[in-house]
Amino acid sequence: MIIAIDGPAASGKGTLGKRIAGHLGLPHLDTGLLYRAVGAHCLASGTLDDIAASAEAARALDVSALDPESLRTGALGEAASVVAARPEVRAALVDLQRRFAAQPGGAVLDGRDIGTVICPDATVKLFVTASPEVRADRRFRELAARDPLASYEAVLADIHKRDARDSNRAAAPLLKADDAVLLDTSALGIEETFAAALAIIEAARARAG
Ligand code: C5P
């Protein structure tokens, strides 16, 4: 069973994906980490503006060496969305994601284009979203726990900027697949979101036989 979870920045899709994968005993890939790792490599080598260098970094990516903790910063989210807008970078990461999805028993993948491009035949597709303000508030709380200088306004501005770049790019824009189920978590907590997602998955599983 392949479960595709897409949605905008800070929509909670990563937390949800991890939780669902744990519950169902499936491997989970947060595909945002791939783009963040490419962005981190380009920032460190001063090649963020270099399309060929970013595509090369994507081809050379070692998935086993990804460190989620160090990659989940606001600056790397921004760098990720810059490199993710390049078709050359996206193309270099397609096979890796499809191989992950094709594991026996299935997998859970979350990102922006899983239901539309990477796994168009996924058993279940969820499009998880929430208002920009709710997403900014959640992200701000996470950051403020680590950084006393974190600012809600800066986080909200970053979310608006990333939403615009991810939605308006030509290559695999952030888009709900026609057959994805919309899950708006603006008024839902983590437990309620998990319960709603599980109900959608069970219904899809029953339909698929
Ligand atoms: O989900 P996360 O915030 O970690 O993603 C970082 C950036 O990577 C996104 O803003 C988006 O530009 C890009 N991304 C993407 N396609 C994916 C996952 C992430 O374009 N499947």
Image (tube, helix red, strand yellow):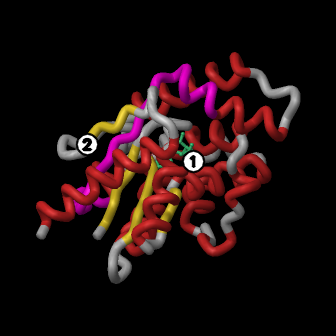
Q: Is mark 1 within 8 Å of ligand 1?
A: no
Provide residue 146's location: percent of width, then percent of height.
83, 40
Q: In this view, does 147 lie above or below 39?
A: above
Would residue 209 be found to the left or right of residue 40 on screen?
left
For residue 52, say whether it is visible.
Answer: no
| Residue name at image x 39 percent, y 74 percent | 99
Report which residue position mark 2 lands on. Answer: 181
Q: In this view, does 31 lie above or below 190?
A: below
Q: Which of 10 and 80 is in front in this view?
A: 10
Q: How crowded is mark 2: few (under 14 residues within 10 Å), some or many (20 or more)?
A: some
Query: Total number of numbered labels?
Result: 2
| Residue name at image x 47 percent, y 56 percent | 17
As helix, strand or loop, the secondary structure at mark 1 comes to helix
Badge 2 amino acid:
Val
As helix, strand or loop, the secondary structure at mark 2 comes to strand
Q: Is residue 131 inside the magenta stretch?
A: yes
Work out which residue is located at the far bottom of the displayed protein and give it: 104
| Residue name at image x 44 percent, y 74 percent | 25
Q: In this view, does 72 lie above or below 20?
A: above
* Residue 66, numbered label: none
Report which residue position mark 1 lands on. Answer: 51
Provide residue 1's location: percent of width, then percent of height.
28, 70
Quadrant of residue 67 within the rendered picture: bottom right
Mark found first going from the N terminus, 1 or 2: 1
Magenta stretch, residue numbers? 119-138
Q: Which of 60 and 180 is in front in this view?
A: 180
Provide residue 57's location: percent of width, then percent of height.
62, 61
Provide residue 130's location: percent of width, then percent of height.
45, 29
Badge 1 amino acid:
Ile
Quadrant of residue 142 within the rendered picture: top right
